[in-house]
Amino acid sequence: MDSPGQDSSMASTGLASGGTLPPGLTEEEAEEMQLELTKVDDEIQTLRQVLTAKERHATELKRRLGISPLSEIKQNITKGWHEVQCSSAYLTASATLEDISRSETYKKTQDTLSQAGQMTSAAFSTMGSAIRSRLGEMRNSPSFKSFEDKVENMKYKVTGRSNGESSPTSNNAPF
């Protein structure tokens, strides 16, 4: 039972590299195996063609039913998540986490971290107030006033304008 267009001489040429038989096989056994291999290859090709046709048909049916690839992905994710939630590993882990959240150690840690957060917040607030107060003091210092006057004088020389003044003060020299 050769395939169409294949004779027994062609079947025997593909036996092994160099045309030699593998050890322990007769030429007759090798030819039978070659015929069986050809049949199996033909069956595989037929099955691939049938599978491709079935996949096209399934795709067409889904398209006509309005089932998009995105909705299939959503459905698969939902199904997968449901399977995860029903798995014994998930249920065990969930129960363990619930036990931990009820433990006295967890509650003490949670309280301690909450207090630390409140104390840190208060410290930052106090530090912000101190910085704001210190900057206010610096702004009223004679050094800062002198620096501010020098910057204003420089601005007048560059732009020709000053804040509400027609000319810079005479006692303020540039840097």
Image (cartoon, rainbow, N blue to C red):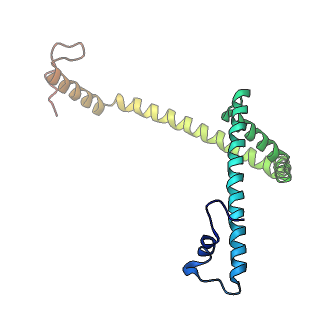
Please give the name of the residue rendered at 24% of the width and 30% of the height, measured from the top-left corner: 146
- Residue at image position (16%, 12%) is 166
Residue 99 falls left or right of residue 45: right
Is 49 rendered above or below residue 73? Answer: below
Residue positioned 58% across, 40% down in the render: 123
Q: In which quarter of the image is residue 172?
A: top left
Query: For this rendering, which residue is in front, 61 or 95?
Result: 61
Quadrant hosting residue 73: top right
Name the residue located 72 percent from the left edge and 65 percent from the top edge.
1
Left or right relative to 146: residue 24: right
Locate residue 76, reporting x and y percent. Answer: 74, 40
Q: In which quarter of the image is the C terminus?
A: top left
Q: Toward the viewer: 42 or 155?
A: 42
Place of residue 164 in the rendered image (x, y in percent of width and height, measured from the top left): 24, 12
- Residue 95 vs residue 51: left or right? right
Residue 78 falls in which quadrant of the image?
top right
Residue 17's x, y, as percent? 56, 78
Between 8 and 163, the one lying in front of the other is: 8
